[in-house]
Image (spheres, coloured by chain):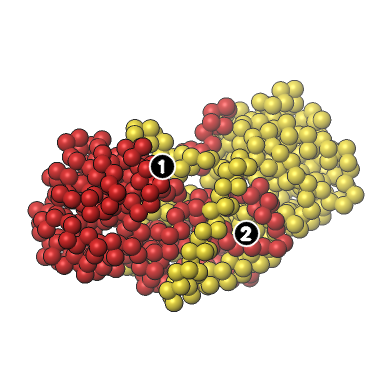
Chain colours: A red, B yellow
């Protein structure tokens, strides 16, 4: 499949790929680079890749698979700087949460290389070199978005790579990916960031009260809103059109519920609230979330019963 | 403190109170009633209270503490029907998520009784007689909202009752409670219900895709949106003004972020996203959420590393 995987960017995604390759593909060499010296030092300590390099050129040297794990806005410039260092026959991929604009940036930066963008739909709210773990991709989906006229041998190698790391792979075109992720990931993050900000800015309710009574639902949003700000800034800027489309739908629906509350239309509220349960059930049935109440976080308490 | 606790409504809250009293106050009698015969049968099987009664009048017979655990909209009528059955010297309380309108309804229904409303800020997305567990209130806040001129002996007995069940008690006036919970609980639920509905109604993205890629953030919202529809209808109707106030702030903030995305203002996005992390840290430091990534739900996978 591949003999040497180079990872540029050693945060949650890059670190997890490095650990997963070492765990699942023992014969494959791993090298990596991160722009932060602290991250490189910590990556070496944790052994995220077998060789942490001091320059990105050294990291990609000889690699037949190069994966960019930097924020979406940095992928174009970083790829361009490595144009001559990446082997001409190497496969270049990434893990960005938006795909159309990243695909365009990579194609422009590396016109003579084979580029197949990808997006593992897996993560936690943590970031940096301490956040990664080898099993991050187990039973999660990885969406691969090959451009037209992709080298099919390289595509199937990339699919096999992600499957070996534990992921289920889906092939999709980049535009559709961006629409799907706008609703399943980008809009939820935007809303979570918004409400946590709103709660912090209130004058009538103190910050301490918001913290104390957050178990009423608010605390769930704070987890998502603790995600990496640089990455999320770039996600929204790089998937602007799809995010704005989904946001428009959301705002319309919220306005309808707001009206139902204002006029006291209990039937409208009930019928809306009732049908959303089915979605939760399906997500649990498909193994995409924990079936335990509260995601299982209260289990140590519940076990006392 | 109390010798006999009667619980009207044997769902998540009522069932948990019954189990907690039996666990933490072994000498205290417990009786209960639910309008659903199926719930009563299941409550008896699980032993949620020591005596499940066939009428609410039987359940409150002789009790010196009566707790209404029915949806907010039902509390007034149910209390009124029990006016003559509840002991004149009994303390009457509840667990509703809104307090001003419930306090008014209880005062009108039971003008000659001592009424002290309360709200344990604890729960899961599950409801019904199988959802409760004795440790639900451990290290959670319970907000008690005594009306003016409350009997201080009865108030301190109610505070001691909740503390014995493991809760930390805070005294607050009902209006302020409603504003605080509007932002920490009611608005998050409204937003979660909205986005899960929005995602279900899309034409460009299939339901199956929404389910498959929900790990990008959306799945968190589906948990909250799986909460009891009847209860939440009543919460929004009974705390209308505070919810609409908070919703207005949220919409303003969302519009500002929408504009930042549209005009490509990365700095505005970054500075907003960066400051929301501190709230998450505080919630974890105060013991109001699990510090493990992803609420700990990936732990069985993470342990493989």
Q: Quadrant of residue B52?
A: top right
Q: Residues within 10 Å of mark 2 (few under 14, many from 20)?
A: some
Q: Is residue B173 above or below residue B4?
A: below
The correct choice, above or below, for A89 with respect to A294 in the image is: below
Q: Which residue is mark 2?
A: A200
Residue farthest top in this picture: B27
Residue under the image location 68 percent in, 42 percent down = B141
Q: Which corner quadrant holds the C terminus of chain A?
A: top right
Residue drawn at (32%, 58%), measured in percent from left and top? A96
Q: Nearer the viewer, mark 1 or mark 2?
A: 1
Q: Earlier in the sequence, mark 1 or mark 2?
A: 1
The image quarter containing residue A47 is: top left
Residue identified by numbered label 1: A130
**Chain holding disc 1:** A
The answer to whether any part of residue A132 appears in the image is: no
Q: Position of A75 compared to B118: left or right?
A: left
Q: Position of residue B254 (x, y in %)?
A: 53, 69
């Amino acid at each position: 499949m591949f003999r040497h995987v180079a990872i540029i960017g050693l945060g949650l995604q890059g670190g997890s790929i490095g650990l997963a390759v070492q765990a699942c593909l023992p014969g494959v060499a791993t090298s990596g680079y991160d722009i932060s010296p602290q991250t490189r030092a910590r990556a070496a300590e944790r052994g995220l890749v077998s060789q942490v390099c001091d320059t990105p050129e050294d990291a990609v040297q000889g690699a037949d698979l190069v994966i960019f794990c930097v924020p979406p806005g940095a992928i174009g410039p970083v790829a361009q700087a490595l144009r001559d260092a990446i082997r001409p026959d190497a496969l270049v991929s990434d893990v960005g949460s938006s795909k159309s604009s990243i695909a365009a940036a990579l194609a422009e930066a590396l016109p003579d290389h084979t580029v197949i963008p990808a997006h593992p739909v897996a993560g936690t709210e943590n970031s940096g070199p301490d956040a990664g773990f080898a099993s991050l991709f187990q039973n999660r989906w990885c969406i691969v978005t090959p451009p037209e006229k992709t080298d099919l041998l390289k595509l199937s190698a990339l699919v096999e790579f992600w499957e070996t790391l534990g992921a289920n792979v889906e092939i999709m075109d980049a535009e559709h990916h961006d629409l799907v992720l706008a609703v399943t990931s980008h809009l939820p993050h935007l809303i979570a960031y918004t409400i946590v900000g709103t709660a912090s800015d209130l004058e009538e309710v103190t910050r301490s009260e918001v913290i104390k009574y957050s178990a009423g639902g608010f605390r769930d949003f704070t987890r998502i809103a603790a995600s990496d700000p640089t990455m999320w800034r770039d996600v929204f800027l790089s998937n602007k059109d799809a995010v704005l489309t989904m946001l428009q739908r959301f705002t319309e629906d919220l306005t309808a519920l707001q009206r139902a509350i204002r006029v006291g239309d209990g039937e409208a509220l009930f019928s809306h609230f009732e049908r959303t349960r089915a979605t939760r059930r399906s997500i649990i049935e498909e193994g995409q979330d924990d079936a335990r109440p509260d995601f299982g976080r209260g289990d140590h308490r519940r076990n006392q019963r």
